[in-house]
Image (cartoon, grey):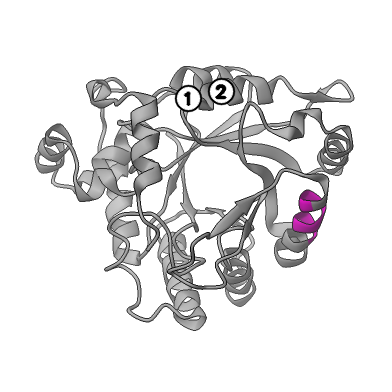
Amino acid sequence: MPDFALGLAALGRPAYINLGREHALPDHRDVDAMRAQCHAVLDAAYEAGVRRVDAARSYGRSEEFLAAWLAARGHRDVRVSSKWGYAYVADWRRDAATHEVKEHSLDRFTRQWQETKDLLGAHLGLYQVHSLTDDSPLYGDPELLVALGELRDSGVRLGFSTSGPRQADTVRRALELEVEGRRLFEAVQSTWNVLETSVGPALALAAESGAEVFVKECLANGRLAVDPPPRVRELAEAHGVGPDAIALAAVRAQPWADVVLSGAASPDQLRANLKSRDVELDPEELADLAEPADGYWATRASLAWD
């Protein structure tokens, strides 16, 4: 069965788009409070056997919080992945007009890789392009590709994450990318949940090719926990778990999934998510819940940051 990983998108900054997050976090989300919350969830994850953590340069201070936790606890068996490409620009304001800005350039990669390396150093096992698309300038930037190839050759595993209704096109194109005759990316992190399944066949091909497959936004940014479809509620009642556990169990049932990300914002949310370990579902059991990809992503884009 797939590993669990704790994603820090909701814990490294005061605002994010996950529904159901507001009551899980401290009332006053200053840096000290969010650091303490992040460390509490990391402690709960480690206690529960989770040994993977996923961060990003744009997740506010997530890398900083994670680095401090690793140093304080002394854990040497935690596998860390992070991402470059977006910059956090909200200045710790929940009401900022813009929270992050995307740029896939050599300058952004060079600067953010150094920042990540300085914080996480030897703990980092995978470095990913954040929200790569099939029309990204990365593909046509020879200097950036050479730099990525050099990082790969130094021993750092490279991957990419995807978002949007054309995820499948991105997965196929990116996994064909080679630098000096070798495939550049060894891992992919995509959005898949019972409401958005369009990338599934491409992820199956990725797994067949030997790439490690991470699945994010398994709860549809909280939609499947806060307002789940009736069938998800029925299964939750039948198994004695929350709808979040059913949604995550559906992801864990996919034969191509290697790592399933929990975006829990509190220890209680994490423990509820991990109850999915005790639920076995057929991979196609909730297949009829899928929405058209364009509609799903339009709904996601309408969610407020808070």
Question: Disc 2, disc 1: CB below 8 Å?
Answer: yes
Is residue 162 depicted above or below 291 in this figure?
A: below
Question: How far from the left and from the top, in percent, is residue 207?
Answer: 56, 23
> Dot 2: what SS?
helix
- Residue at image coords 80%, 28%: 140
Q: Is residue 207 left or right of residue 269?
A: right
Tell me the crowding category of disc 2: few under 14, some 14 to 19, or many 20 or more residues within 10 angstroms, Cα based.
some
Q: Nearer the viewer, residue 13 or 303?
A: 303
Quadrant hosting residue 290: top left
Asked whether residue 290 is drawn in magenta, I would say no
What residue would you read off at disc 2?
207
| Dominant SS in magenta | helix
Q: Residue 161: which disc? A: none
Q: Which residue lies most toward the front here?
A: 97
Question: How far from the left and from the top, in percent, is residue 260?
Answer: 44, 41
Q: Which of 45 and 205 is in front in this view?
A: 205
Alpha carbon separation for disc pair 2 and 1: 6 Å
- Residue at image coords 36%, 46%: 302
- The amino acid pointed to by label 1 is Trp
> Dot 1: what SS?
loop
Q: Give the range drawn in magenta.
A: 108-114
- The amino acid pointed to by label 2 is Ala
- Residue at image coords 69%, 48%: 125
What residue would you read off at disc 1?
256
Q: Which of 241 and 300 is in front in this view?
A: 300
Question: How far from the left and from the top, in percent, is residue 272?
Answer: 27, 54
